[in-house]
Amino acid sequence: MHLGIAFGGPGLPVKLNYGLTGRFGQDTAAFVRLEGFGISALQMTAGVTQMLSTSGFGEAGATAALGRPGLLGGGLRLGGGPGDRGGGLLLGGTIPIVGDAALWNLQISPFVYPAEVCLPSGRALRFGDGVALPPVLAIECARADAALASAWLDDARAELASVPAFLRLAGELSALGAPTQLRDAARAAADDERHHARAAFSMASRWAGTAFAVAPLDAQPRFDRPSPSALTQLAIEAWQDGCLGEGAAALCARRGLARVRDEQAASALSRIAPDEERHAELSWGILEWCAGAGGSSVRDAIAEVGRRSAPEQEHSPEDEDWLSWNGRLTAAERRAARAQIEEQATARLNRRFSGA
């Protein structure tokens, strides 16, 4: 939602600018915006927004406008400014292309996205210190339940990114000489994530009332021979993304499955929950193997990272009943699930390495 000022048209009148935006994605996201300019004009925009840095964004889209009687038009919408996925300052404007040229405008509006309701899903596809997600290339806008559509779309993108993450993991395990069962399990996990992504995209399309197009991702193995640093990196990622991340995803899916009343969501969660549990156990197997193959330096690195917890994030109020009906958890419930998994996993890690 946003609230600010705008000016445009004959005489450059200053007007109150206000509106609501549905955002479907993370760093690269589709958006749908309905906004008003005073009481004389209404505008609908559909387009794509892109994070350009950790504190800036840009957006572009097509817009249709309705003004005072007899004033109709459509054109190009451009904007940007300082901000992140939670909010910022929108500096934008509309360039009329068809219809009445008086519908041009410029605006300055603070904005906020008050709800984020996604489950932790899949194994992260890491590049350096960052995590990659497939960008949304296109969205055909119709109607939307913004919160659920955005949540399932975020899940779908995370699950889809897990496919190359697991395929790369299988290649890296092979290069490091890991046991065959670990390599085979990583390839099987990639197939699981394809099914998860299809199910989540189906749910996102259902709640958005639209079809999505995303760009595929690829990831080649980062090392081709055994080394202490390679073993350490795999072990840390197994802990963070598997033992904790997929462990928490599995617990959230189980808890969502226990309350869900939507048949399509129940079908998706009934497959995701056991698959993510199996992926978490695969990560424990990788952790064990890396610790054995890498010796004390790898075990020390695992012990060190095991003492850290993920930082908590602030979340806005959510519709608990609506989320529960769809098998989804609130932000507080997801934090509680993550905390439970961290406690259990840390105890398991300490038992494993207490005598090392």
Image (spheres, rainbow, N blue to C red):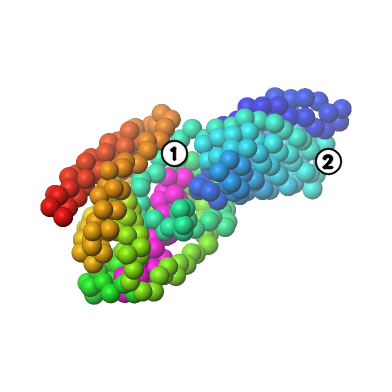
Residue 167 in magenta stretch: yes
Residue 120 in magenta stretch: no
For label 1, the crowd category at 10 Å Cα-Cα, with few meaning under 14, some 14 to 19 and many 20 or more, is many
147 lies above or below 5: below
Q: Is residue 189 visible?
A: yes
Q: Which residue is mark 1?
A: 116
Q: Three-letter amino acid code at disc 2?
A: Ala
Q: Residue at x 50, y 47 (%)?
A: 26
Q: Which residue is mark 2?
A: 101
Quarter of the image with the N terminus is: top right
The residue tagged with tag 2: helix, strand or loop?
Answer: helix
The main secondary structure of the magenta stretch is: helix
Quarter of the image with the C terminus is: bottom left
- Disc nearer the start of the sequence (2/1): 2
Quadrant in which residue 340 is drawn: top left
Which range is magenta? 149-174
Quadrant in which residue 80 is drawn: top right
